Amino acid sequence: MRYAIICDVHSNLEALETVLAEIKRQRADKIVHLGDIVGYNANPNECIEIFMEENITSIMGNHDAAACGLDDPLWFNPVAKGAAIWTRANLDAKKRDYLRGLPEKLALDNTLLLSHGSPENRDDYVIDWIDAMRQFAVMEKMLVNICFLGHSHLPALFAHRGLNHNLDRYGKHTLDANNRYLVNFGGLGQPRDGDPRTCFGVFDSEQMTVEFFRLKYDVLKCAKKVKKAGLDGSLADRLIEGV
């Protein structure tokens, strides 16, 4: 089974359309999303509509929960909070109900977990080796071998034993079925690793490989929409800079 795995779309229609076109070329069997369809950018309704039309499986991210009213963005930074409030005000009822129905986590099978933040908590970041080691202990108790996650917007591949990657390069990596892994393919709609290109990944459950992809998209078009919508201008700037 070839899973195309995306995360943190954040209302970026241009990046989403670019990635979905490449996923079709990759002939993935199923698309799964690791949370935060909305937030930050200017096309929340359009992005959710694509998810509904394409039957994309998604879990709930912290921005999804804030936008649909299930959580209060009290602890968001001011820019993120402003975007969450804007998104909540601009979502139509059907899209709001869709977000409300998303699950917190999903399992692909008994040993593969989909989580927005850490395996333990939707709001926890897994950024470095110390974070990863803490979560490997959680995964052991859960009997989970591989967790695909997002939230940090930073591509990374952490292995419980052996080489760990904060990925400076992209491509295919083979996983050991007897090891444990935390895999983040990066933020599709708001990359934060200094590379403004959008990103996604493919997991082949038969070959036990993960492959990281980066793609150019019309980032200037998305940034202009952010400013036109009245969202904070820094959100447009960070798209262009990839931070």
Image (cartoon, helix red, strand yellow):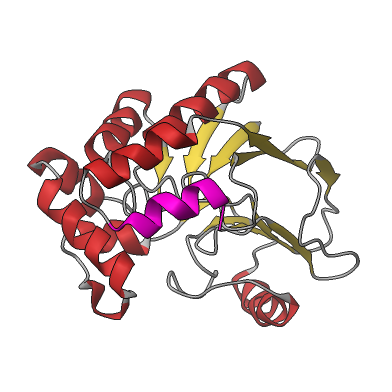
User: On screen, 236 above or below 138?
Assistant: above
Instruction: Give how far across and how far down residue 16 sits, in percent.
Output: 45, 33
Instruction: Give how far across and how far down residue 233 sits, in percent.
Output: 33, 55
- Identify the magenta region: 232-243
Say if residue 153 shows up in the picture: yes
- The front one of 58 and 190 is 190
Name the image quarter holding the N terminus.
top right
Q: How many marks?
A: 0
Please, which residue is most extreme toward the right here? 162
Using residue 143 as the reference point, say whether residue 79 is left or right of it: left
Using residue 11 as the reference point, say whether residue 16 is left or right of it: right
Q: Residue at x 83, y 50 (%)?
A: 175
Say if residue 203 shows up in the picture: no
Instruction: Give how far across and how far down residue 115 sits, in percent.
Output: 50, 60
Based on the displayed image, in which of its 4 quarters is residue 171 positioned? top right
Using residue 1 as the reference point, say whether residue 31 is left or right of it: left
User: On screen, 38 above or below 83?
Assistant: above
Instruction: Give how far across and how far down residue 107 sits, in percent.
Output: 52, 53
- The front one of 162 and 72 is 72
- The front one of 47 and 111 is 47
